[in-house]
Amino acid sequence: MAQQSSSPGQGRRSPSRLSPRAVGGIVLAVLVIVFIALNRDKTEISFIVFTARTALWVALTVAAAGGLVAGFLLGRQRYH
């Protein structure tokens, strides 16, 4: 009786399928983009030592980018 050798990729997902985590991330990104696009009014932004008047979408984009960077940095695996 011949034994079947297991290939290294056996049991893994096809690269063409998106994980539920990826789908959730895409949906969330689309919702954030739509939210930012719908909020284009001018507003006053206060940040610690300065105040600026800018379009709300700019402030929302900066906040979303900051959250993305923070999530990336906090979510990385640390190798010692």
Image (tube, rainbow, N blue to C red):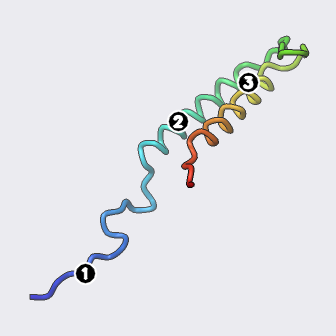
63 left or right of 23 in image: right
Residue lying at 66% horizontally and 31% vertically, measured from the top left: 67
As rendered, which of 2 and 56 lies closer to the eye?
Answer: 2
For label 1, the SS is: loop
Identity of the residue drawn at 49% across and 45% down: 22
Find residue 72 and report its horizontal and vertical position in percent: 62, 42
Left or right: 1 with respect to 77? left
Q: How far apart are labels 3 and 2 at the CA level?
A: 17 Å
Precedes in sequence: disc 2 or disc 1: 1
Q: Mark 3 points at which residue?
A: 60
**Disc 3 or 1, which lies upstream in sequence?**
1
Amino acid at circle 1: Ser
Q: Position of residue 11 (x, y in %)?
A: 30, 64
Residue 27: mark in rendering: 2
Q: How crowded is mark 3: few (under 14 residues within 10 Å), some or many (20 or more)?
A: some
Can you name the residue that lies furthest to the front here?
80
Alpha carbons under labels 2 and 1: distance apart: 39 Å
Q: Real-space Cα distance between discs 3 and 1? A: 53 Å
- Tag 2, which secondary structure? helix
* Circle 3: residue type: Leu
Residue at 80% of width from left, 15% of height from top? 41
Report if the CB atoms under discs 3 and 2 are less than 8 Å apart: no
> Viewed as shown, does residue 41 lie left or right of 74?
right
Residue 54, given in percent of the width and then of the height, sits at 87, 19
Label 1 sits on residue: 5
Q: Which residue is drawn at 84% across and 15% down?
A: 48
Q: Nearer the viewer, residue 72 or 34?
A: 72
- Determine crowd level at label 2: few under 14, some 14-19, many 20+ residues with C-alpha closer than 10 A: few
Picture quadrant where residue 32 is located: top right
The answer to whether 31 appears left or right of 4 in the picture is right
Select label 3 or label 2 by which is in front.
3
